[in-house]
Image: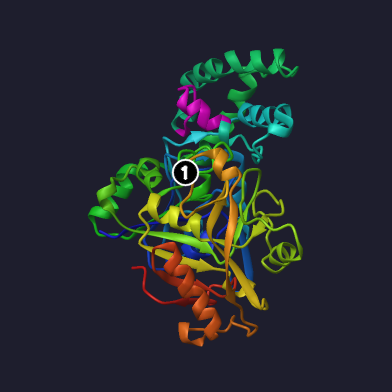
Amino acid sequence: MPALVLLGAQWGDEGKGKATDLLGGSVDYVVRYQGGNNAGHTVVVGDQKYALHLLPSGILSPGCTPVIGNGVVVDPSVLLSELSGLNERGVDTSKLILSGNAHIITPYNVTVDKVTERFLGKRKIGTTGRGIGPTYADKINRVGIRVQDLYDESILTQKVEAALDIKNQVLTKLYNRRAIAVDQVVEELLAYAEKLRPYVADTVLVLNQALEEDKVVLFEGGQGTLLDIDHGTYPFVTSSNPTAGGACTGAGVGPTKISRVIGILKAYTTRVGAGPFPTELFDEDGEALRRIGGERGVTTGRDRRCGWFDAVIARYATRVNGLTDFFLTKLDVLTGWEQIPVCVAYEIDGKRVEELPYSQTDFHHAKPVYEMLPGWSEDISKAKSFSDLPKNAQAYVKALEEMSGAPISAIGVGPGRDETIEINSFL
């Protein structure tokens, strides 16, 4: 009964897509369990690069069934566009399964997201403007629209009316916007119904039956641990739970079914959007990491903020997720530095702190305490085993492993499928 969770151990963009894709040939199901098209994965297969936003990375692996779970929020136009793009490139998407309980991102959710961010001005969160947060808010407020509602026009109309009763008041009286017509929204949503119907299923039943049949199921988180709505750097977080516990609620699988939790760590640190970032660099090193690492958001197109590796947040990710392994990505990007700083602790109000402070104020004022590790200049992109790495690169990996609190089982030394060193098997 091997069920695995694979998630980001930093602020997202760690390379989860590559890790999922590598495992895709060995698993039967790959499940997205939270988030929406605010997340993005880049997967390189041969000379082909695929940018996935809503679809599970396993869709690129023949024989693997990709699943969008109940915890995901779905923009139908984005989903259908992404499927069409892959079909045009010869990728078989017919095995996709979509939960009927997943919530729909409606046009008014996108509108509310964008106008709210503009209204907040300097206090904005830095959302992608794709309606993710407002859709999750509707879900919690019990006025959300689910995929299954597309197949009952009466129910759909009632729910859209209920949602717009308040939203139109806010749009017209607070934001000076036009009211949104119920009929227009209903008509647009109904247009997606038949196009989505072939994919809609009871994914909770499908996944639990698969595990009972000893199928291998991989749960793929979007974003990262520090963007978790409960355990991240609130309020600069996403609107769902990318942490391991989110896999249970977002897919309908009990925690006793999960046998392994793999955290994806970048060999340095990045984040997109606003919020505190203790190791962020504003100098030539930061620009070099951005340029060499190709640090631009897959979904947002925004440059990522870059900094040195932060062992404090890695330890935190190990704790809140119960991580059993790490997959270390982009080690090759660090080639060429004589010395590489690693943040081992913070200084807050003159005191050394080795664990993530629970106080938002303390974390905002945290200054990194660095330990310098020797770098390497040799090209590591062709390394096939750990012993192929330069001694200083080996020492860097071992130091990160010791500081982070879980073994590193694989190392990415380039963007391609074959540019990975596997130390211990994940399955």
Which of 89/72 is in front? 72
Q: Residues within 10 Å of mark 1 (few under 14, many from 20)?
A: many
Q: Amino acid at mark 1?
A: Gln
- The residue lying at 44 percent from left, 53 percent from top is 316
- Residue 56 appears at what percent x and percent y? 49, 54
Q: Is residue 45 above or below residue 172?
A: below
Tell me how the rendering is colored.
rainbow
- Residue 411 appears at what percent x and percent y? 49, 73
Is label 1 in a helix, a strand or a loop? loop
The residue labelled by disc 1 is 34
Q: Is residue 146 magenta?
A: yes
Question: In which quadrant is the C terminus drawn?
Answer: bottom left
Q: Which residues are magenta?
A: 134-147
In the rendered image, is residue 237 in sight? no
Q: Is residue 407 magenta?
A: no
In the rendered image, is residue 230 in sight? yes
Which of 95/398 is in front? 398
Q: How many marks do you count on the picture?
A: 1
